Amino acid sequence: MSTSTNAQKLPEAFTDFKPSIKVASPGRINLIGEHTDYNNGFVMPTAIDKKIYFEFKENGTDSTCRIYSATYNAYLEFDHNNLSISEKSWENYVLGVTNEIKVLGKSLKGFDCIIKSDLSTGAGISSSAALECGFASGLNALFDLGLSKVEITQLSQKAEHNFVGNKCGIMDQYASVMSKQDHIILLDCESLHAEYIPADFKSCKLLLLNTNVSHNLADSEYNTRRQECEAAVEVIQKKYPEVKSLRDVNLEMLEEFKAELEGKQYQRARYVIEENERVINATTAIKAGELNEFGGLMYGSHDGLQHNYEVSCPELDFLVEFSRDKDYIYGSRMMGGGFGGCTINLIEADKIDEYVAEAAEAYFKKFNIKLDTIAVSPSEGTIVEKL
Ligand code: GAF
């Protein structure tokens, strides 16, 4: 059982708070490779310099856990021996992480935790993974749980599956914890092999344009996409039992099953197979400094997400279209789960102000919504400090 309130009156422990652990837990961007992670494919994310900050201390009790979110003025108190899913979405991230730590047989005591954030929620830059992984990292350090960084990403993913109900892949958690300053990660989501590639885009920068919309289809459609991909794999496995996921399928094989696959399964699978190929080609292009080539792959990714995977929305499509005839923009695409959030753009740094002004005016005229930018740079993953 848990109690939660808007924190009108804070427990005394939070007024003179002396932490023994501090954690800085970042959000992430993804250059290319969307909806490929839960299909055991390839992604290219990195952490950003926008973070959730945690402070932890033991509170002398056996099992009372008290969390105060200073940014959202919210308070949650629970007993770690008696955990259940909450009606409040944000609470399920921390309750879920606590639950997964207990499932691993680790022992906890009571603790207090303060959370602050400069990471926007609903913008598709994965405040969820930052919350889960930062919280898990803090408890790991506070109680010497001996969890490795990869174990932290995995238990955080499970928390999201089991308490939040979102059957996400591993990309966001991995990027939040494992990223390295000024690098992007080519992550194989099957083996979790990571190659760190210098984030060198010459005179260009990565720019996020935030649509400021978050259509509520996101959660239900996300799980539906995952089911559609898994259903396609089941059909393919009847002839090719060695196929474990869409990662093991190529376009030629997929064609054999076109008539058998139901509903949208063919086009979903086609998108995933093509997107995996784009990530591999993007790696070569980035290493060779071929920004035109990489940008073309970004547009290809967006087209697939819009037409075959159908997770985009009019606001994202508008922004990507708006960028297409600008010779100083190499590529643009929706980023993350979809149905809102941000586009990611590769743009000449000295053109950013001019472009943002033009795009914001056109976007407002079309949707009557303010367009925001989020400045990001590839950053280090979770940082834990023992005081
Ligand atoms: C969300 C999920 F959490 C990730 O696992 C990933 O699937 C992404 O959507 C789409 O690429 O961020």
Image (tube, grey):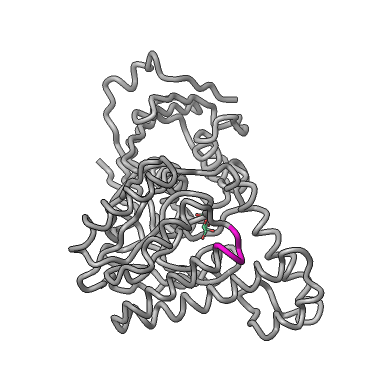
- Specify the quadrant that holds the C terminus: top left
Question: Residue at 39% across / 58% down in the picture?
Answer: 29
Where is residue 386 shown, x and y percent of the image?
28, 44
Q: Residue furthest left?
A: 350
Q: Is residue 310 visible?
A: yes
| Helix, strand or loop for the magenta stretch, by majority | loop
Q: Position of residue 132 (x, y in %)?
A: 46, 45
Q: Nearer the viewer, residue 95 or 359?
A: 359
The residue that appears at 46% across and 79% down in the rendered structure is 280
**Is 4 rendered above or below residue 331?**
above
Q: Is residue 136 above or below residue 72?
A: below
Q: How many marks?
A: 0
Q: Is residue 307 magenta?
A: yes
Measuring 32% from the left and 49% from the top, which residue is drawn there? 360
Q: Is residue 236 shown left or right of residue 182?
A: right
The image quadrant of residue 183 is: bottom left
Q: Is residue 298 magenta?
A: no
Q: Is residue 143 visible?
A: no
Image quadrant containing the N terminus: top right
Q: Is residue 69 above or below residue 350?
A: above
Locate residue 269, reporting x and y percent.
65, 71
Judge left or right: residue 284 versus residue 94: left
Q: Position of residue 138 (x, y in %)?
A: 38, 43
**Which of the 4 quarters of the picture holds residue 281?**
bottom left
Residue drawn 79% across and 66% down? 262
Range drawn in magenta = 306-310
